[in-house]
Image (cartoon, helix red, strand yellow):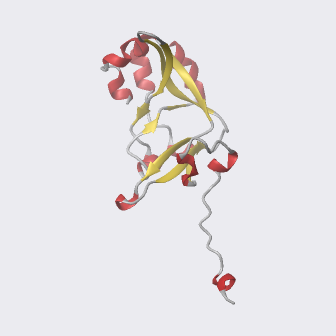
């Protein structure tokens, strides 16, 4: 979470000088109602098909390899997300994107706020999203809760 990333040794270098934007058209979160199976949701910004989430980048060097990596920062949930999960990504307002990239760490920490509920919406999607092999547009289609009429089963 943004509240702890500045105290985490794993992110120290990235927090100090490696902010980035992670473009997206939506993100997923899973809700576990009453301890049952988790239901995935797609959360998106109603007013724009694309937005940026606050991120940090770094390069990790091991014995035999170098790995470029990005992390998306999270913050406490807004009212919409609070119904689904206890955190959410830091979605940046468009006018704060340049600030995120150019700001000092203290200013960036101030930008780690929950995005306004009024600009986000969410809907249930299929558990197909749980399998990375399902890389197709149907993954983000709203879950259809309509049941077929019982007349279909009569002889």
| Image location (x, y in percent) of residue 5 | 36, 23
Snapshot quadrant of residue 135: top right
Please give the name of the residue rendered at 62% of the width and 63% of the height, measured from the top-left corner: 144
Please give the name of the residue rendered at 57% of the width and 43% of the height, measured from the top-left corner: 119
Please give the name of the residue rendered at 62% of the width and 70% of the height, measured from the top-left corner: 146
Please give the name of the residue rendered at 47% of the width and 15% of the height, measured from the top-left corner: 58
Q: Residue furthest bottom?
A: 155
| Image location (x, y in percent) of residue 22 | 56, 26
Image position of 125 (left or right of 13): right
Snapshot quadrant of residue 154: bottom right
Where, quadrant-wise, is the C terminus in this rendering?
A: bottom right
Give the vertical position of 3 relative to 12 (above or below). Answer: below
| Image location (x, y in percent) of residue 13 | 40, 11
Q: Residue furthest front?
A: 64
Where, quadrant-wise, is the N terminus in this rendering?
A: top left
- Which of the pair 9/1 is nearer the observer? 9
| Image location (x, y in percent) of residue 66 | 49, 12
- Which of the pair 151/19 is nearer the observer? 151
């Amino acid at each position: 979470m943004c509240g702890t990333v500045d105290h985490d040794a794993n992110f120290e270098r990235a927090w100090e000088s490696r902010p980035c934007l992670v473009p997206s058209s939506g993100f997923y979160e899973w809700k576990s109602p009453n301890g049952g199976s988790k239901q995935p949701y797609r959360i998106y910004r109603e007013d724009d098909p694309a937005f940026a989430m606050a991120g940090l980048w770094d390069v990790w060097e091991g014995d035999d390899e170098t790995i470029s990596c990005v992390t998306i920062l999270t913050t406490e949930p807004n009212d919409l997300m609070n119904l689904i999960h206890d955190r959410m990504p830091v979605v940046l307002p468009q006018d704060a994107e340049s600030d995120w990239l150019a700001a000092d760490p203290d200013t960036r920490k101030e930008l780690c706020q929950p995005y306004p509920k009024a600009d986000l919406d969410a809907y249930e999607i299929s558990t197909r999203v749980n399998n990375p092999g399902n890389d197709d547009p149907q993954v983000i289609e709203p879950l259809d809760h309509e049941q077929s009429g019982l007349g279909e089963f009569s002889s």
